[in-house]
Amino acid sequence: ANPARQLRSHLEGAQPPGTQGKGAMGCGSSSPISAVATAAAEPSPPVRSAASPTQPTVATGKPEPQSVVHIGPAKAAAAPAALPTVAQAAPVATATAADSTPMPERAASLPPPPPPVAKQLVLVLGGPGTGLSEQCALLAEQFGCQHLVVGRVMRDAVLSESEEGKRVATLLNDGKNLPAELYAAVYQRALAAIPLEQAAARTPLAAVLLDGYPRTVENYHVFAAALGAPVMAIVLELSDAATRDRAEQAEGELYDEEAFLKRLGGFAKRTAPLVSVLEANGVPVHRIDANGTDAEVHSAVCAAVRWGATLGRA
């Protein structure tokens, strides 16, 4: 038996009355049965995948062919055969002497970063005519330490236009004294700006000579609370007669005895109590006779501080 003829007979029997002999959509002479029968006898055109790129349509003037709808039970697409599961082999560890230690233990075994180098504060005190700033400059030149002069530190703070510098400028312009807390804040910023390498630890390179501040008991307590106590103090001592002689030589005709006595008395009033506080708090105090020449005083200072391989209280 012809399969196409059997399919035609089957479909003609299933059609509703009045539809036999009419073409598709009610027009034409060919019946949908013949179209379906013809399609059943011919191989089905390949179905284009949705993922395949659409070919562009070229205008030829001919009507595009209508897609043929297949009537009948759809065949389920055969599922691809499952590939046999292959057990993945564990990666072969190629341990070496460098990475044989587990990562957490290896990180824990690394040495911690070195702590920042502590600056060794050296307080230098001296009255008028003692050559305090000259001795600090000689120490800085010979040992490479830092020399902080109070006037220069305050000027740099004002020029930097930092918050502390602005407060200093405002108070000085108003003719007011600077509070001890402001001094300490300015020095704290100045000390933090001094870079030190690890090789400088506990050597004279880590020393910072404090010239002119702190020089009162009040300023010292605030300074020590914010920055720590100095490792030592150098006190240059000069007799009143030698101090007067040096003042007269330096000022010449401008020498004023009353002004000189005021400066001398102010230093004794400020510094003598501070030296006592330093000694009471265990800070080594080196008293240096400043009656000699600059070179002689410098030799005495070097012998007293004994700066060599290390620096500190020990």
Image (cartoon, helix red, strand yellow):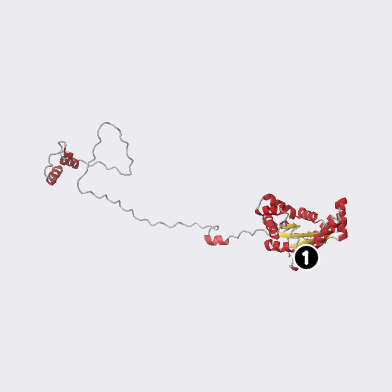
- Residue in the picture at 83% in, 55% down: 294
Residue 130 relative to residue 189: left or right: right
* Residue 144 in view here: no
Q: Quadrant of residue 186?
A: bottom right
Percent across and percent down for residue 100 are 53, 59
Residue identified by numbered label 1: 273
* Residue 217 in view here: yes
Residue at the front extreme? 174
Residue 239 relative to residue 102: left or right: right
Q: Quadrant of residue 279?
A: bottom right
Q: Nearer the viewer, residue 109 or 154?
A: 154
Q: Quadrant of residue 86?
A: bottom left
Residue 167 relative to residue 235: left or right: left
Task: Check the image and report above or below for 191 versus 53.
Answer: below
- Residue in the picture at 75% in, 66% down: 277
Task: Check the image and report above or below for 53 versus 117.
Answer: above
Residue at the top extreme? 61
Q: Quadrant of the C terminus?
A: bottom right
Q: Residues within 10 Å of mark 1 (few under 14, many from 20)?
A: few
Percent across and percent down for residue 151 are 74, 53
Task: Name the element at disc 1.
Answer: helix
**Figure label count:** 1
Q: Quadrant of the N terminus?
A: top left
Percent across and percent down for residue 13 are 12, 46
Percent across and percent down for residue 131 are 82, 56
**Mark 1: amino acid:** Pro
